[in-house]
Every structure is written in C-alpha cells, then in structure tokens.
Image: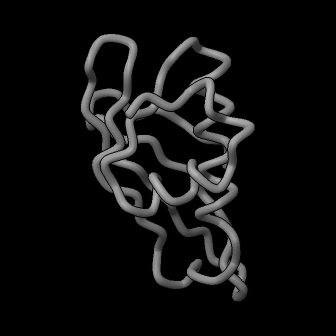
Amino acid sequence: MDLRDVAENQRYEQGFYDPEGQLRVVFADYAVKGKTRVLLHVEADPALRGTGAAGQFMQALAELARNEGLKLSPHCGYARAWLSRHPQYRDVVEY
C-alpha cells in the first residue's frame, strides 16, 4: 500500500505485509504548523517490528515531504533518530 495522508485524522499511514502475509500498518500522527508537519508519534504494528517497514515508511514520508514542499519537525524519538541517520533528507527537516 502506498503512503497516504489521512488528513481528517492528521495521520500518515502505509500498509506492509508481515512475515505471515497479513497486511499491517505503520503510521505517524502529526500536527499542522503551516507547511510543516510536526511528527508526534510514529508506530509500527508489532508484527512488523524488525522487518524494516518503519524505515521504509519514513523514507516514503521524507520523499512525500520533499515532493510537496513540506517540512518535517520530528518530535517523536524514532522519527528524530531516523532523520538524523539519513542526512540526504536534511532539506525536509525543521527542528
């Protein structure tokens, strides 16, 4: 499933298949601050942990932000750590 913005819930989400073939979700709750999306919480379904799905989700989210001219302000520890480990997305990060 492609990354989608569920704007009415202020949540980005993306589906991934777990090792047993079940569709599961990784999501990020956000707040809107102009053209910045404040990432409040990123969470992967427990069945996806250790599969790399959360990292793929963050990459898709960073690409989406870049393509839409948005900034990401990571308040969530996972999002902050992921973005700091991927300097190629510095242009979309706002601390």
Vertically, is 80 above or below 23? Answer: above
Please give the count of numbered marks on the rendered protein: 0
Q: Nearer the viewer, residue 25 or 89?
A: 89
Place of residue 61 in the rendered image (x, y in percent of width and height, measured from the top left) = 58, 39
Residue 55 is situated, as x and y percent measured from the top left of the image, at 65, 60
Q: How is the image coloured?
A: one colour
Residue shown at 65% from the left, 64% from the top: 16
- Most extreme residue toward the bottom is 20
Q: Image point 28% across, 48% down: which residue?
A: 40
Q: Please tell me which residue is depicted at 51% across the width and 59% down the height of the picture.
A: 81
Q: Quadrant of residue 87?
A: top right
Establish if 40 lies above or below 15.
above
Image spot of residue 80 (x, y percent): 45, 53
Between 33 and 95, the residue placed more toward the observer is: 95
Instruction: Residue 67 in the image: state x and y as whole percent.
Output: 67, 17
Q: Answer above or below: position of 71 versus 58.
A: above
- Quadrant of the rendering where the C terminus is positioned: top left
User: Residue at left 37%, top 29%?
Assistant: 37
